[in-house]
Image (cartoon, rainbow, N blue to C red):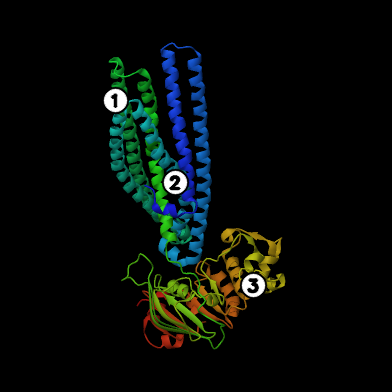
């Protein structure tokens, strides 16, 4: 039930020691509650002086207050630990995602990572709040009470000792069934998250193609399956709670009958029988509390397990094996025998397999291919966002294992399909690569990107605030901000474009083409595209299919024979093959 990796979290052992001490004190005040209440009732039954009733009742009240005071302290300590630890885990998770980059996002799914970072952390925090307190209560309080009951009445102690293993066995049987259902439910929740986010991202395209209603049925099917699994899980959870309550109530009833018969036959005095009967519900209470929250702890455990799996992935931080690196017209990159496979895909399903590729100086290289051919995987590997399983790579004749080199990534500018814009001013977004750039430098870069005319229409100019993800401005202006970033980062001479105009209309794309062509000068340009007019601007073209380079050369060379390039061009134009 408790994940052993919890004990490796900072502060866990200290927390457990504090909880053990507080729970032990709480167990004794529960015992004193039952003892003094029974004593007061027995004295009242035997019609003893009033003072012999008042004194036990005062001690009972004091024990009652202390019990809830210890419980409050216990709860506050656990809540503080749960809040701090869950936030630490969230920070570690975000750092891990940031360091791993697109490789992890492609493998885990954006929806899964968002779910883990938001809802998953909330479930983990609730798991921490429940599991430590419940386990301590169940481990310490019943044994303390049982020892006292044995001291009062051995037969009652034996009865309670026999009942508990039966209850626990029944809990284990139902608990295993509940865990299997909860595991399946959380997995379905992850699938639903990924489906929902993918649907939101692709909604404009789906609407344009007239497929949005058809995809709505797909979302309904996935969400209905999640509803069905949730109801099945809740059915088992409710059944287990009912069964446990029934068994513990039956156990107390059997004990009450046994004690009643003993009193009728004068087998033992009233006080031992009464204190045993009062303490019996308290004896079963930690077990019942644990059962009631068992399903909630299962959700938290599943979420924590999912997060731990991400955190335990091998780290691939930037290395510094590339020394004294600059990119100029004489620079070269050679790539031989490069293979990359996304985790979980299988060793026989290679996502990228490049035999030989060479990049030179200020070359403009177009990367084309059908959707899913490996264009994005290739340029993300060259950008250092994905780490290949194996590769023979040389940058300026320096051998490196991958492109995740700090000095390499400091020399490149990456322009994706959807620009990364953060909540802040336009000036701050333009200065992404050079945060200390002056306003005059920012204005010059914006003018080169054709952004000045748009900024002049804004009341606050460069200090105009935009929302996270570029909310508040059009897609064309978002791309111009990305171009301005590249113009401002004039010390970065490698440009990587991942279909930057894919989501733009043709008029906006042609308006951006002139500043983009200006930006190409004195840069190594790697341009993945499915728009034909960009191919004419390239010095060299790479044709991708199924993760491999099936053809490469200058546009003239590729046009000269009827190969993969020609077939792809005809296919993109809609010609009959």
Asked if the residues shown at circle 2 and circle 3 are in contact, with their CB atoms under 8 angstroms apart, the answer is no
Asked if the residues shown at circle 2 and circle 1 are in contact, with their CB atoms under 8 angstroms apart, the answer is no
Dot 3 alpha-carbon crowd within 10 angstroms: few under 14, some 14 to 19, many 20 or more: many
Q: Nearer the viewer, residue 353 or 572?
A: 353
When the figure is inspected, residue 452 is found, relative to residue 210, above or below; the finding is below
Element carrying mark 1: helix
**Camera-side mark, 2 or 1:** 1
Whether residue 20 sits left or right of residue 150 in the image: it is: right
Q: Is residue 417 visible?
A: yes
Q: Nearer the viewer, residue 224 or 138?
A: 138
Element carrying mark 2: helix
Q: Which residue is mark 3?
A: 450
Q: Is residue 536 visible?
A: no
Quadrant of the rendering where the C terminus is positioned: bottom left
Distance, label 2 to label 3, CA atoms, is 53 Å
Distance, label 2 to label 1, CA atoms, is 34 Å
Q: Which residue is mark 1?
A: 254
Q: Position of residue 431 (x, y in %)?
A: 64, 69
When the figure is inspected, residue 81 is found, relative to residue 449, above or below; the finding is above
Q: Which residue is mark 2?
A: 127
Dot 2 alpha-carbon crowd within 10 angstroms: few under 14, some 14 to 19, many 20 or more: many
């Amino acid at each position: 039930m408790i994940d052993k990796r919890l004990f490796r979290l900072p502060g866990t052992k200290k927390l457990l020691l504090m909880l053990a001490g507080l729970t032990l004190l709480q167990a004794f005040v529960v015992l004193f509650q039952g003892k003094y209440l029974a004593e007061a009732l027995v004295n009242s039954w035997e019609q003893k002086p009033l003072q012999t009733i008042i004194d036990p009742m005062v001690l009972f009240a004091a024990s009652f207050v202390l019990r809830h005071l210890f419980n409050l302290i216990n709860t506050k300590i656990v809540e503080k630990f749960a809040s701090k630890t869950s936030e630490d885990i969230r920070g570690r998770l975000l750092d891990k995602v940031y360091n791993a980059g697109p490789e992890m996002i492609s493998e885990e799914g954006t929806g899964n990572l968002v779910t883990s970072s938001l809802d998953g952390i909330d479930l983990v925090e609730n798991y921490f709040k429940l599991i430590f307190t419940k386990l301590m209560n169940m481990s310490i309080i019943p044994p303390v009470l049982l020892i006292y009951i044995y001291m009062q009445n051995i037969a009652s102690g034996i009865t309670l000792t026999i009942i508990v293993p039966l209850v626990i066995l029944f809990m284990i049987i139902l608990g295993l069934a509940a865990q299997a259902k909860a595991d399946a439910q959380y997995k379905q929740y992850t699938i639903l998250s990924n489906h929902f986010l993918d649907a939101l991202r692709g909604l404009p395209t789906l609407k344009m193609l007239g497929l949005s209603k058809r995809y709505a049925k797909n979302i309904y099917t996935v969400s209905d399956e999640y509803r069905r699994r949730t109801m099945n899980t809740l059915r088992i959870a409710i059944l287990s709670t009912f069964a446990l309550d029934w068994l513990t109530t039956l156990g107390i009833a059997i004990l009450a009958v046994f004690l009643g018969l003993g009193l009728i036959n004068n087998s033992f005095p009233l006080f031992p029988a009464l204190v045993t009967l009062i303490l019996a519900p308290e004896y079963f209470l930690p077990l019942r509390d644990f059962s009631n929250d068992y399903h909630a702890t299962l959700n938290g455990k599943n979420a924590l397990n999912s997060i731990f799996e991400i955190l335990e992935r091998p780290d691939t931080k930037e290395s510094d094996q590339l020394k004294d690196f600059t990119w100029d017209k004489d620079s070269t990159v050679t790539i031989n025998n490069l293979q990359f496979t996304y985790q979980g895909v299988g060793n026989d399903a290679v996502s990228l397999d490049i035999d030989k590729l060479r990049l030179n100086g200020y070359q403009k290289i177009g990367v084309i291919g059908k959707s899913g051919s490996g264009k994005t995987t290739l340029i993300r590997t060259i950008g250092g966002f994905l780490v290949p399983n194996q590769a023979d790579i040389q940058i300026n004749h320096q051998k490196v294992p991958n492109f995740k080199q700090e000095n390499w990534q400091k020399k490149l500018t990456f322009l994706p399909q959807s620009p990364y814009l953060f909540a802040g001013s336009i000036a701050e977004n333009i200065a992404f690569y050079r945060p200390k750039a002056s306003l005059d430098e920012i204005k010059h870069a914006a003018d080169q990107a054709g952004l000045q005319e748009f900024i002049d229409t804004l009341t606050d100019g460069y200090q105009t605030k935009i929302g996270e993800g570029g909310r508040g401005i059009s897609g064309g202006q978002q791309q111009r901000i990305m171009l301005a970033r590249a113009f401002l980062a004039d010390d970065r001479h490698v440009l990587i474009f991942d279909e930057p105009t894919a989501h733009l209309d043709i008029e906006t794309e042609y308006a951006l083409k002139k500043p983009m062509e200006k930006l190409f000068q004195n840069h190594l340009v790697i341009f993945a595209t499915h728009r034909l007019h960009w191919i004419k601007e390239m010095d060299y073209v790479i044709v991708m299919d199924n993760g491999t380079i099936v053809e490469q050369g200058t546009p003239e060379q590729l046009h000269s024979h009827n190969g993969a390039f020609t077939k792809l061009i005809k296919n993109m134009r809609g010609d009959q093959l």
